Amino acid sequence: MATITDIQQQRRKANRVSVFLDGEFWTGMPQDLCALLNLKIGERIDERRKREVEREVGETAALDAALHLLGHRARSEKDLRKRLIDKGFNDAVADAAMARVKEYGYVDDGDFSRQMIEAHQSAGRARRSTLWRLRNEGVDPEEAQQILEEEYPAENEIEVAMTWVSRRRVDIADPKGRQRLTRQLASRGFGYDVIRQVIRQLEEASRRED
């Protein structure tokens, strides 16, 4: 059994403390976690208590890392968990952190998918590239497909492509202009049928203007 011989505020991070057992550094943790665990100088620590504290410290660190990652952008559950593992947290600690962020409502693959689909439509991306991105981000393929059908049905692709084209200068009467537009739309994931209909609508609009 060991004894907590000191609890020191860290110099570089004022909101964290370093805890020492028998004169040796044991672990660092947020100051509020230390208070929550009721750690005190002079406390005798057996192995069971030691493991409990270390588990809490690990889970809190993983939760902080998860929240930091989510602060940059929304992420799927699978992607967030993978990033925690990549940061060195073990499976049990990563799972505990994921359970907390899900409980707090910070991770929801359905909401994540809807946000991404909306962003892709605004950016003029086709359904195919949107679905690929969702799967690549770790959303379950079946769930991704289902939400895509609800939020971005196939009949909306022409409208999305036309909206994107409307923000650019396109000389549809110039064969090179049509070829360039075809390549651009194809690079955004649109299929031949959609591209053909977009070009036809642009040509019809051009004739009406003439």
Image (cartoon, rainbow, N blue to C red):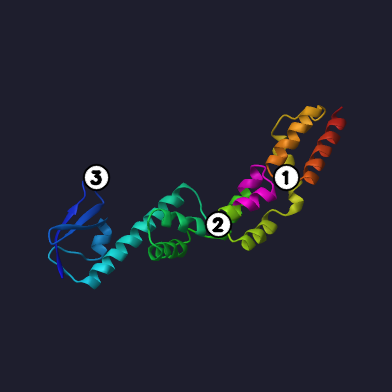
Q: Nearer the viewer, residue 148 or 24?
A: 24
What stretch of residues is rendered in magenta?
119-133
Bin the neighbour count of mark 3 within 10 Å (Cα to Cα): few under 14, some 14-19, many 20 and up: few
From this view, report whether residue 205 is shown above or below residue 133. Answer: above
From this view, report whether residue 178 is shown above or below residue 55. Answer: above
Q: Amino acid at mark 2?
A: Gly
Q: Which residue is mark 1?
A: 190
Q: Which residue is mark 3?
A: 12
From this view, report whether residue 12 is shown above or below residue 93. Answer: above
Q: Say which of marks 3 and 2 sits in front.
A: 2
Task: Tell me the element at label 1.
Answer: loop
Check if residue 95 falls in the magenta segment: no
Residue shown at the point (45%, 54%) measured from the top left: 83
Q: Amino acid at mark 3?
A: Arg
Which image quarter holds the C terminus? top right
Residue shown at the point (31%, 64%) measured from the top left: 56
Q: Is residue 202 toward the left or the right of residue 122 in the image?
A: right
Q: Say which of marks 1 and 3 sits in front.
A: 1
Where residue 167 appears, as percent x and y from the top left, is: 69, 34
Q: Nearer the viewer, residue 179 or 18?
A: 179
Q: Which residue is mark 2?
A: 138
Spatial CA span between label 3 and label 2:
36 Å
